[in-house]
Image (tube, rainbow, N blue to C red):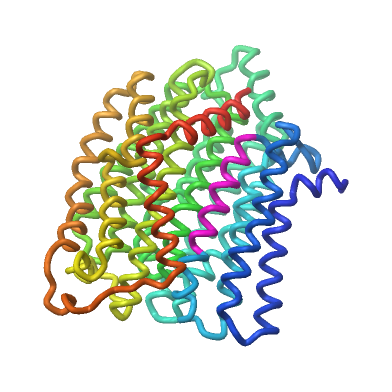
Amino acid sequence: MTLHELYLLSPEISMALLAGVVIILDLIFKNKKLLPIVGFIGLLVPLFFSISLTNADPNNTGFYSALIVDKFSLFFKYLIIFAVAIVLLISIEFGKKFGKIQGEYYSLVLLSASGMLLLVSATELITIYIALELTALPTAALAAFGRNGRSSESGLKFLLLSAISSAILLYGMVLTYGFTGTTYLPEIVIRIQEMIGTSENILDSGALLFGIILITAGFGFKISAVPFQMWAPDVYEGAPTPITGFLSVASKAAGFAIILRIFYSAFDITAITVDWSSLVAILSAISMSVGNLVAIRQQNIKRMLAYSTIAQAGYIMVGLAALSTLPGGQDHAGPAGILFYLAGYAMTNLAAFAVITAVANNNGGDESISSFGGLLKRSPTLTAIMTLSMISLIGIPPTVGFMAKIYIFGSAMDTGLEWLAIIGVINSVISAYYYLRVVKVMFSESDSALNTKLTPEFGTYTAAIVGFIGTFIFGIYPTPIIDLAQTAIKSIML
């Protein structure tokens, strides 16, 4: 291990060390309010290293080429660090519920984030698997942090289903290794291209095809796409609210990052264009349809947003399907749209969860949609933030959600997937029912809440405002994020 390799790994190392610092401070100081503040300020260190790596060699590799720091991985590092910062802000007030175990809570968030940072840079199957486990295990513990029956069930379900999905993923990786003789993504694509050069159809190899299917299934769990979404509603409902937001944003972003890297870098898209595109397009259509239709009947807002995130995964997969419809994946619109959508979704969803946290704290932990009744009179600012978030999730201007859907549905239209874009638009219309229901409840009157002003804690309020500003500003002027997304995608083009 050289100093240069340690430098490449500096964001991950500094994030893990920050988790250790939080644990030590938890042992030394009785005042637990210090912990989220230290964690939040400490994020400047991995952010600094990420920025310094941005200005370095654009294709830094290390650890025998198992790790790469390129524009693609750095895009997701920034996104993950942003998500962690918002989650820590939301947790300042919420974390008081955990009493003496606040240190463990914050350190597990940071450790999970370190796994995500490693995952988006991994270019070798074993490293990818280890990073996934480093991400999933702390998250399973966090899901059970509510210390009640529902939260314990949430953590146990996440742990068991995560273990099953990891096993499926590992089987897929083993089959891929057995077929290609290597675990390195760049070498896997070379072996596949050599096979194609001998006029052998990749689809004639049952072992490799089955391995690809198993890998797709394993990552389908991570992004909560149908039919691997069964864990999301119960886990989202039972987990602490900031962790639900963390799962919906950071975990999904890391999952899509590694999916893009694997299928852009390891499996030759040209050879399996029709079959791969059809598979992803069908899963996309089913995911958005199932998520939206089931969300309509939900009364708990976190459970509603769990089905919403299943639908959002379907929208994002439209870009993944568009990736494989042109020869060699030469069009950047689909994959760049995925990155832009994930960035916009992070701002929107985290703003929504900040408002949910503030309302639930004020209502004794009530997370039903009806608990938002009369919010307009109790807190006009939070009402405005939640309204914009719901509008953005639907895809109505002037929000970043609208621009993201225009971009990603446009890529489908440009690549011959008009039917998928039409299904996406129809589902967006369907989703308006349950998103606008929240808005309707907030603007309605509730006798029990009319005289109760809601004043959120500073951290939660700040997180909500930041998400609100990002959702609005990048809805009007999305160019900076689109440019970053296109640059990031170009860095993993073969």
Q: Is residue 434 above or below residue 263?
A: below
Which span is picked out in magenta?
71-87
Q: Residue at x 69, y 54 (%)?
A: 12
Tell me the residue at 22%/49% (across/down).
293
Residue 477 is inside the magenta segment: no
Where is residue 330? Give x, y as percent.
Answer: 52, 18
The answer to whether residue 230 of the structure is visible from this angle is yes
Any magenta on residue 81?
A: yes
Left or right: where 2 falls relative to 288: right
Q: Residue at x 67, y 59 (%)?
A: 15
- Percent across and percent down for residue 378 are 23, 71
State the image quarter where residue 18 is shown: bottom right
Nearest to the observer: residue 117 or residue 275: 117
Please identify the quarter of the rendering in which residue 133 is found: bottom right
Principal SS element in the magenta part?
A: helix
- Image coordinates of residue 140 in percent, x first then y, are 52, 66
Q: Is residue 266 left or right of residue 482?
A: right
Q: Nearer the viewer, residue 229 or 210?
A: 229
